[in-house]
Amino acid sequence: MPGPVILFAAKSERWDQYEHPLRTALSEVGLSDAVLTTQAAPETVDYIVYAPNSRMQDFTPYTRLKAVLNLWAGVEDVVGNDTLRVPLARMVDHGLTEGMVEWVTGHVLRHHLGMDAHIHGQDGVWRAGIVPPLARDRSVTILGLGALGAACAGALAALNFDVHGWSRSPKTIDGITTHSGKAGLADALGKAEIIVLLLPDTSDTQNVLNADTLALMPTGAIVVNPGRGPLIDDDALLAALDTGRIGHATLDVFRTEPLPPEHPFWTHPKVTVTPHIASETRAASASRVIAENIRRGEAGEPLLHLVDRDLGY
């Protein structure tokens, strides 16, 4: 008797990347008899491996569906789908987390050390005498203390940065000064010489950096956003950069992607744009996460990384 039917619903290039790693991972958890396919009669499908930018938007025909397993960490483009009435699991992948930690640590160190002045200043001028503080004298604030935020906070603390973290609900993390709630946000921003945004995109987090909150930060503070584009009010950030309230912004995510060529971020001298590369999902490690959840589903065990529909992540 064949195993569960697993429908891969993503763009064709993703299938080329994931087919072999998924088959390998399914075999490793004892599901070598699973039917992995890009086409199946809806009433036969048990699980959907899903990218929110796929053509599938109506889950109603999938009457036997047990769970949808998101390929992305972000679920804002699927969590509000009224036709989705089965458990939704987001991607929590060690490879994705490691990639994010490396990107965040690299850019925090870049700004902390003032590396841009030397990288871009190859003009014959000897720019000596500007010495950054040691990491222990530099305050870095992480907005969002989920899996990615906590991992980044831990890595920066290990480098001796004075790390503060903010989340909407109270959290305790060794070596990190944590803040929560509205009052806590003001405290966290006031400490943020460098701020890293790793919040999900929800109605509560959109425009968390706006004219009022940017004004709470130390003059010349650095903004690093590998989280979600809508976390920042673009116009407010540009105004703060123009006045010097914010010293620089390194942005990896945007409200519209790809970032339109006419957007002022491209040409602003205090903005670095990177093309949503802070952390890519790696097919091999992500496939193991998906395969384990399918094994759990077939064994009647609780699924990992389930999304709370009320919270939106």
Image: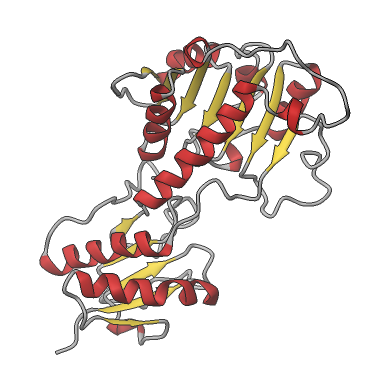
Q: How is the image coloured?
A: secondary structure
Residue 220, image quadrant: top right
> Residue furthest toward the bottom?
1
Q: Residue at x 30, y 59 (%)?
A: 289
Side of 174 relative to 153 (left or right): left
Q: Nearer the viewer, residue 279 or 120?
A: 120
Q: Can residue 200 be seen at all in this image of the molecule?
A: no
Q: Position of residue 156 (x, y in %)?
A: 44, 26
* 300 with respect to 106 (left or right): left
Residue 38, above or below 197: below
Q: Tell me: residue 101, above or below residue 132.
A: below
In screen coordinates, is 64 left or right of 116? Answer: left
Name the image quarter holding the C terminus: top left
Horizontal side of residue 311 vs 142, given as left or right: left
Residue at horizontal 60%, vertical 27%? 209
Label tally: 0
User: Is 227 in front, or is 287?
Assistant: 287
User: From this viewpoint, which residue is outermost toward the right?
Assistant: 124
Residue 195's x, y, as percent?
Answer: 55, 24
Which image quarter holds the N terminus?
bottom left
Q: Position of residue 106 (x, y in %)?
A: 55, 35
Q: Between residue 86 and residue 231, name the one nearer to us.
A: 231
- Residue 134 shows in this picture: yes
Q: Residue at x 48, y 50 (%)?
A: 76
- Asked if 185 appears above or below 58 in the picture, the reply is above
Q: Position of residue 133 (x, y in %)?
A: 58, 11
Is 153 in front, or is 47?
153
